[in-house]
């Protein structure tokens, strides 16, 4: 069984880098051998290749829904939110768009479970590397949510 934790985002666009920052912090943890942590950047459609044949996938990305910055939203591939919630990725394919396409074409090696942890962001400033304070403060809570997802698998 392979489980993936994938952090998405653009390091040069302030809060959009939340997924990258979360997986960098998560990499410091002692995780089970079957868990692979990936810093994906803005994968576009290559996300589909990354998740192929995985048992479970947890994706962390920025969302813009109007909630308080730092709010953690949980989605699955069965209840994908509108693509407009996610900042646009490479070639206008964000994670929701890529996952929707993967479902429509009926990938044979589709993961058994996909969980998306969307972190509400505050800023999308270009060429700003730092996260805004409220988004950065959410990192421990996002890691806790990831660990709960992983722990749920071992019950």
Image (tube, helix red, strand yellow):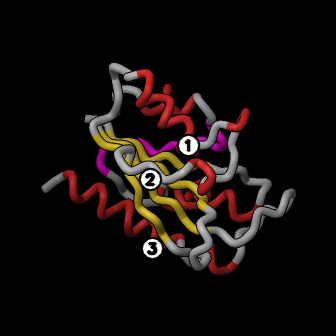
* Discs 3/2, front: 2
Report if residue 15 is visible in the image. yes
**Do the numbered discs 2 and 1 sit on residues whose CB atoms are within 8 Å?**
yes
Q: Residue at x 33, y 34 (%)?
A: 111
Q: Quadrant of residue 125?
A: bottom right
Q: Residue at x 51, y 54 (%)?
A: 60
Q: Which residues are magenta?
A: 32-43
Say which element carries label 3.
Answer: helix
List the single residue furthest toward the left: 155
Say which element carries label 2.
Answer: strand
Binning the other alpha carbons within 10 Å of mark 1 as few (below 14), some (14 to 19) or many (20 upward) gives many
| Location of residue 63 in the rendering, given as x and y in whole percent from the top left corner | 59, 60
Numbered circle sitting on residue 35: none
The residue where tag 1 is placed is 95
Considering only order in the chain, which callout, 1 or 2, is on the residue closer to the N terminus? 1
| Location of residue 3 in the rendering, given as x and y in whole percent from the top left corner | 33, 41
Numbered circle sitting on residue 141: 3
How far apart in space, not on screen, are marks 3 and 2 (Cα)?
14 Å
Who is closer to the viewer here, 99 or 21? 99
The residue where tag 2 is placed is 116
Q: Is residue 23 left or right of 30 when viewed as pictured? A: right
How far apart in space, not on screen, are marks 1 and 3 (Cα)?
21 Å
Say above or below: 113 vs 82. above
Q: Is residue 9 left or right of 126 when viewed as pictured? A: left
Binning the other alpha carbons within 10 Å of mark 3 as few (below 14), some (14 to 19) or many (20 upward) gives some
* Discs 1/3, front: 1
Q: Is residue 5 left or right of 31 when viewed as pictured? A: right
Q: Residue at x 48, y 31 (%)?
A: 50
Q: Residue at x 41, y 56 (%)?
A: 75
């Amino acid at each position: 069984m392979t489980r993936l934790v994938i952090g998405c985002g653009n390091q040069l666009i302030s809060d959009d880098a939340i997924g990258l920052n979360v997986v960098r912090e998560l990499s410091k943890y002692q995780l089970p051998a079957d868990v692979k942590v990936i810093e994906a950047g803005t994968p576009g459609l290559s996300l589909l290749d990354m998740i192929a044949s995985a048992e479970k996938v947890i994706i962390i990305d920025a969302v813009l829904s109007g909630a308080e910055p730092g709010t953690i939203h949980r989605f699955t591939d069965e209840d994908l939110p509108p693509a407009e919630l996610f900042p646009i990725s490479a070639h206008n394919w964000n994670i929701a768009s890529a996952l929707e396409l993967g479902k429509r074409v009926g990938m044979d090696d589709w993961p058994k479970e996909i969980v998306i942890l969307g972190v509400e962001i505050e800023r999308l400033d270009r060429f700003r590397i730092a996260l805004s304070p409220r988004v950065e403060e959410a990192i421990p809570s996002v890691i806790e949510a990831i660990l709960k997802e992983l722990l749920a698998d071992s019950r």
